[in-house]
Amino acid sequence: MNILVINCGSSSVKYKLYDMTQQAELAVGLIERIGEVESRISHTCAGESTELSEAIGDYSVGVARIIDLLTTCGQPPPLSDPGQIAGVGHRVVHGGESFAESVVVDEGVLAAIDECSQLAPLHNPANLAGLRAAMAILPGRPQVAVFDTAYFQSMPPAAFHYAVPYEWYAEEKVRRYGFHGTSHRYVAGRAAELVGREKPNLITLHLGNGCSMACIRAGEAVDQSMGLTPLEGLVMGTRSGDLDPAIIFHLAGRGMSLEQIRASLEKQSGLLGLSGVSRDLRDVLAAAAGGHERAALAVDVFAHRARKYVGAFLAQLGTCHALAFTGGIGENSAAMRHRILDGLEPLGIRLDAGRNDRRAAEPFPISADDSRIAIWVIPTDEELMIARDTQHLIA
Ligand code: AMP
């Protein structure tokens, strides 16, 4: 069964084609700069990469081009006919309170995703455009929407409410939703297998350019670090994470426009803002090692914030069976894993938790001692999760 996974960003489309019967990844690619004079396509199939520059005016041209590449590139191409695609799985960023799980898309679902666009104005319209394009190009093929927010719909009211006038929630849907849900769900599922419990208590840390942490009790997400938008919570590559909302009024009072403040908090904060060096932790760590004080500060703040959330979630869980790291930083930076967990031995965490450092095809245990909290590094795979949901829903 061939499943195509599509992830439309604000000006890009990532895609992967799976043969779910053979558990094989047949092709992968990315179209960037959609809508610009020259878009870039990179397409890889059977280990062979093709790079192209051509005008891709919108998502429907983009999706049509993807299908074209899948049926013409390679010897032989992975598909001889678009009809061999059994279904398409789409990443959708915001499902609001309407979706607690993945769904087969119909007109009602499209309308509900559209309604959630006010909560994710950069992402949901692009996701919708990809959905509509795939529906038009592959008529009759089931399309499945997999939401970043769905996994966190199990959060209890105490975790998702802000302590603001209740009408903000009732009328404006202002609440905490949580993001990276597909990644946390994948990692939590794998961690459950690894600890040998069907419904474990877990803390999953997705640390990449965007960073979030999830608190999972008896197999269900009960809290996470992101909020109404992916700006809340941990320090990220360029996003601030948590801050006193009064900072915004303070800066507005000093003459900064709301748009400037928003752009700064989203694009000029986090590791980049603090260090002034880079949003990439590798560069920041290298600068810190060379004596760059602001880079060292950025590393300290990043680790301090993450440690604070680990402590908060451990307190919520009482008993925790495992902590699982994922994302570019979580998977690759032993130094950062160590910094985050350093000092938490009294809570059951072993100090050697960051010693290993390798990108494992298979997750590996750093500590699997029963009496302590097991620490795992689990490479995430959101696309595979989307493909599995799609297969499950259309079977
Ligand atoms: P992601 O968004 O999950 O692709 O993660 C991207 C981030 O992972 C980059 O910005 C880097 O900061 C970080 N990263 C990747 N490899 C390493 C590494 N070996 N050490 C530290 N950070 C890394």
Image (cartoon, rainbow, N blue to C red):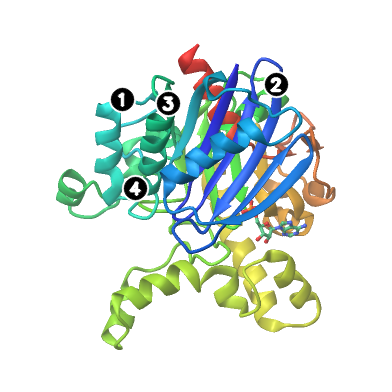
Q: Quadrant of the N terminus?
A: top right
Q: Residue at image x 66%, y 30%? A: 191
Separation of marks 1 and 2 at Cα, in angstroms: 28 Å
Q: Which residue is mark 3?
A: 143
Q: Amino acid at mark 3?
A: Gln
Mark 4 or 2 closer to N-term? 2
Q: Position of residue 337 (x, y in %)?
A: 72, 53
Q: Which mark is residue 23?
A: 2
- Badge number at residue 125: 4
**In the displayed image of the protein, which residue is found farthest to the top?**
395
Q: Secondary structure at mark 3?
A: strand
Q: Is residue 164 left or right of residue 286?
A: left
Is residue 379 something one can see in this rendering?
A: yes
CA neighbours of label 1 inside 10 A, class few (<14), some (14 to 19), many (20+)? few
Q: Nearer the viewer, residue 17 or 177?
A: 17
Three-letter amino acid code of the residue under disc 4: Pro
Q: Does dot 1 land on a helix, a strand or a loop?
A: loop
Residue 270, image quadrant:
bottom right
Does dot 4 land on a helix, a strand or a loop? Answer: helix
Q: Residue at x 48, y 40 (%)?
A: 63
- Quarter of the image where one finds residue 80: top right
Q: Which residue is mark 1?
A: 106
Contact check, label 1 and label 4, Cβ < 8 Å: no
Q: Earlier in the sequence, mark 3 or mark 4?
A: 4
Sequence-first disc among 1 and 4: 1
